[in-house]
Image: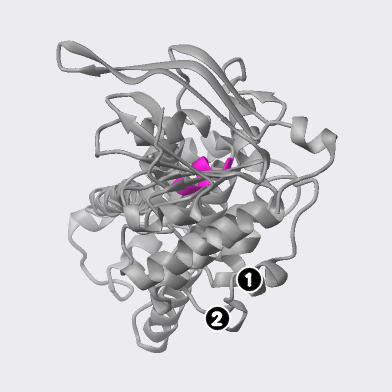
Amino acid sequence: MDLSTWQEIRAGARPGDEVPNHVYRWVTAIAVLNEGDAEPDVAAADEMAGTTTMTLEESFGASPGYTAEVTTVQMIQWFLYAISALVVGAFFTVVAIQRRQEIAVMRAMGASTGYLLRDSITQSVILLVVATAVGLGIGLALGAGLSATEMPFALDPSAVAAASAFLVLLGLVGAAFGVLRVTRVDPLTALGASR
Amino acid sequence: MTTTTTETTERVGLMMSGVTLLHADGENEVRALDDVSLTVRPGEFVAVVGPSGSGKSSLLAVAGGLIKPDAGRVQVGDADLVTASKRDLATIRRTQIGFVFQSANLLPALTAIDQLRLPLTLGRVAEPRDPMQMLEEVGMADRADRRPHQLSGGERQRVGIARALMTRPRLLLVDEPTAALDSKRSQEVVALLAREAHKHGVATVMVTHDRDVLHHCDRVLQMTDGKLAPVDEV
């Protein structure tokens, strides 16, 4: 089949029908199956047929609106990552402030900075992992709900795993700001009236 | 009950000599502790009275290795608190010193029995006491599973005292233990302190302004403007 026949078919024209000229200027996609091990001579094929060869990703990008939309969604994703780190950091800072008296008592009792850091980091890791697991559960449930409708929807396990790991990692960075406050608590605060 | 063998009577609970602590108060320098000397034998229960701001808290902070004095010597057992590094001080506090705080300062999330286990989890302890036995000793065995908010002020203070004794410290420092208690509970708590100090041979310093509990103490000292002097009235 030559290219013009394909273009006529794609335009919905029957053999012998008049077709407008623009039909011959446009082809959205042709997938070529390469059998055998030899690398196809893509450049020579393009030369012969007067086409441009692209990878799948590039051809998506060439379609109008696709790049803009994907960039927007990706930006939302990155902002959400950044916000999650900020929220987690704020959360653990509040926790550290609320535990000040408690930490001061433990310091007065002779708890080393290393002990208190280990203690706080363990708490953060447990909280972060549990929180991520809960979020993951809700996400997967919503995804399953969506898959049941006509909307095409797929969750790639590797992408989900990467996002979860990244969330925990960013959360730890955020938590570090709160946890480090532990090292600055003065055990003297434990003496005198409780504040 | 005082210690009888010569070896233990020679041992020091707390030894402070010529201790001076300066405090910056605006432009002036205030002597929070002014050439304070105090020796407390193992098993001796000493009370320090004085108005607020007289330096009582500073005395506890210095004796407990929380602040280093500007001059003088401080010794708890065999440990010199003035030359010790910050890290060593934490270890000395953990193994040699017990604190009883004003409002017991128990950790809100822990049950009474877990409060007593806490000092043993902070690091290696040579001869830890048994938490349940210790709770029994302060009359709190039946409240072992209660959390601080389920205990009365006096009960919290009892748990606090038991917690401070878990590591068999040489020195027990008690900060206003009766501040939040009525007079009956105050008597009970201070009597308990005296009993524990004598029984376990731990040098005990209690800071208080509650003069009604002083008859439980072996010795009473008065703190005025950073100076420490004996009191005869008890």
Look at the numbered disc 1 and give the secondary structure of its residue.
helix
Asked if the residue under mark 2 is in contact with the one under mark 1, i.e. CB atoms within 8 Å, the reply is: yes
Residue drawn at (44%, 83%) of the image:
A144
Q: Nearer the viewer, residue A178 or B158?
A: B158
Q: Which residue lies furthest to the front in this view?
A: B233
Q: Residue B135 — which label?
A: 1
Q: Is residue B12 left or right of residue A155?
A: right
- Say what amino acid the circle numbered 1 marks: Leu
Badge 1: few (under 14), some or many (20 or more) residues near its Cα, within 10 Å? many
Look at the numbered disc 2 and give the secondary structure of its residue.
helix
| Location of residue B39 with respect to A3 vertically, above or below | above
Q: Nearer the viewer, residue B117 or B185?
A: B185
Quick check: can you spot residue A192? yes
- Say what amino acid the circle numbered 2 marks: Arg
Residue drawn at (53%, 66%) of the image:
B159
Q: Is residue B122 left or right of residue A127?
A: right
Q: Is residue B158 magenta?
A: no
Q: Mark 2 points at which residue?
A: B143
Badge 2: few (under 14), some or many (20 or more) residues near its Cα, within 10 Å? some
Magenta residues, as a range?
A105-111
